[in-house]
Amino acid sequence: MKLQLALDLVNIPEGIELVKQVEEYIDVVEIGTPVVINEGLKAVKEMKNAFPNLEVLADLKIMDAAGYEVMKASEAGADIITILGAAEDESIKGAVAEAKKQGKEILVDMIAVKDKKARAKELDEFGVDYICVHTGYDLQAVGQNSFEDLRAIKDVVKNAKTAIAGGIKLDTLPEVIKAQPDLVIVGGGITGQDDLKGAAAQMQEMIKQG
Ligand SMILES: O=C([C@H](O)CO)[C@H](O)[C@H](O)COP(=O)(O)O
């Protein structure tokens, strides 16, 4: 199980400073969608240059023109690129094909997908690398989480790795670990803490103990 740090509400220098504090405890650093909107793919490039040993995920949440966008994120240095599960099958297949060509991975974000189990089964057959259940900020605000969705997709996903994101904190991490995803994505649960390093270290330790 890997730990991914999501950077959403920072600029590039702030993001790099944050990662310096927790580098040893994380496996993947995410350039979040708001950062891509504010700073562009330059954020991916600068993060990869600063931390060549970490995997960098570009959270583009692609909806169309998938092959082209995967190509551009790959050129910027992304190791993993996200596409929405709600995108057309052709877009998903295009993203997978381009990622394979570039030697990169595709993570499908299941945000706003209604029948997650059925869609996860289809996505798995398209050869995506990760399927991620995700409670976005707007549903976190009304008290939702994705723990049940993770258990549901794990029943049907045979080949892809599974991931979970959305409001995960130290106190909810044990429930996440119990469901055994391959990737745990944490933003505010680390970046919003007074002791970032302590929070990341404790999370990595809990993950290691599995
Ligand atoms: O993907 C995300 C969200 O849609 C904003 O871009 C976050 O990176 C993801 O939810 C993880 O962040 P936290 O919810 O703060 O853990």
Image: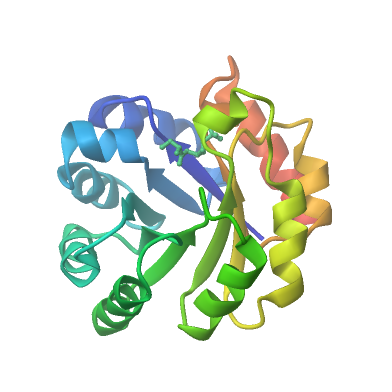
* Residue at the (58%, 39%) spot, across then down: 166
Residue lying at the far front in this picture: please name it: 114
Closer to us: 136 or 32:
136
In the picture, measured across the screen, residue 35 lies left or right of residue 121, that is left
Position of the C terminus by quadrant: bottom right
* Residue at the (24%, 32%) spot, across then down: 12
- Answer whether residue 115 is visible to the viewer in this image: yes
In the picture, measured across the screen, residue 5 lies left or right of residue 151, that is left
In the picture, measured across the screen, residue 76 lies left or right of residue 132, that is left
Instruction: Please provide percent x and percent y for residue 3.
Output: 59, 50
Q: Is residue 101 above or below residue 77?
A: below
Closer to us: 151 or 169:
151
- Answer whether residue 182 is visible to the viewer in this image: no
Closer to us: 124 or 19:
124
Q: Is residue 181 above or below residue 118?
A: above
In the picture, measured across the screen, residue 92 lies left or right of residue 162, that is left
Instruction: Please provide percent x and percent y for residue 42.
Output: 15, 44
* Residue at the (28%, 34%) spot, across then down: 35
* Residue at the (28%, 52%) spot, across then down: 48
Q: Is residue 99 above or below residue 149?
A: below
Residue 171 lies in quadrant: top right
Instruction: Please provide percent x and percent y for residue 91.
Output: 30, 71
Position of the N terminus by quadrant: bottom right
Instruction: Please provide percent x and percent y for residue 69.
Output: 19, 62
Q: Is residue 46 above or below residue 163?
A: above
